[in-house]
Amino acid sequence: MDTNELLEKIALNVVQGRVEAEDEGFDQGMEGQPGVTELVTEALKQDIDPKRILMESLTNSMQKVGEKFEKNEYLIPDMLASAECVGVAMDMLSPYLVKAGVKSKGKFVIATVKDDLHDIGKNIVAIMLKGAGYDVVDLKTDVSTERIIKAVKENNASYLGLSALLTTTMRNMEDVIKELKKEGLRDKVKVLIGGAPISQEFADQIGADGYGKDAFQTLEIMKKYEQEKAA
């Protein structure tokens, strides 16, 4: 298998949501064929530039997944399967990317706020950000305001993502932003929020910097921040 064919195969298997050879994928007849794990291993063995694997296989394939999601061809579990492929590939590529001198786009602390245990949306966003080149610190679920503030401080984070799926817990996002102000951190960190009950109106109301209705919109917001930094 030559380089281009291998990169295309990795991208195809991300879209198919196949982490390993034993996974079925969305189309029939793929079980038993190499999945993302086997293909990335082969690509690294062939000394293919890890940046090419990241950009041509992972980033491009997730754009296709995003298009399918927008067209309702993919549902959240489908997107999660593809995101899991990217997460596994990124764990394999990270040491090679560091060795190749690829710098992180910045520290991004992410958490589901206190008293909320939902994490599917947060996990997809975390994996997608990782695939986009951010150094993600995932604090998981039911995270207290104090612990979030501590993580922002300790990691000198440039970005903070907050998730909530309940109307009863979404107000905890406002507490986090208030505490960031008290600690003198608010101007140092961009705060993005998301979750089923969240809206742009709510984000404006509590003083968040951005609202992402899904992982793909969150990445678009991050691209704008990157362009602003580069200008």
Image (spheres, grey):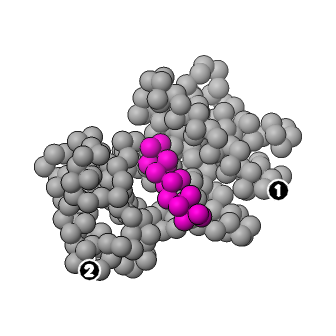
Residue 98: quadrant of the picture: bottom right
Q: Which residues are magenta?
A: 216-231
User: Please, is residue 27 above or below residue 132 in the view?
Assistant: above
User: Please, is residue 223 above or below residue 19 in the view?
Assistant: below
Q: Quadrant of the N terminus?
A: top right
Q: Nearer the viewer, residue 34 or 195?
A: 195
Name the residue type under label 1.
Asp
Q: Nearer the viewer, residue 135 or 186?
A: 186
Residue named by callout 1: 47
Residue 17 appears in view: no
* SS under mark 2: loop
* Numbered-mark total: 2
Q: Nearer the viewer, residue 200 or 98?
A: 200
x and y percent of residue 197 in the render?
Answer: 23, 42
Point out the residue furthest to the front here: 231
x and y percent of residue 129 in the render?
Answer: 50, 54
Name the residue type under label 2.
Glu
Mark number, residue 183: 2
Q: State the predominant SS element of the stretch in magenta.
A: helix
Point out the residue furthest to the left here: 168
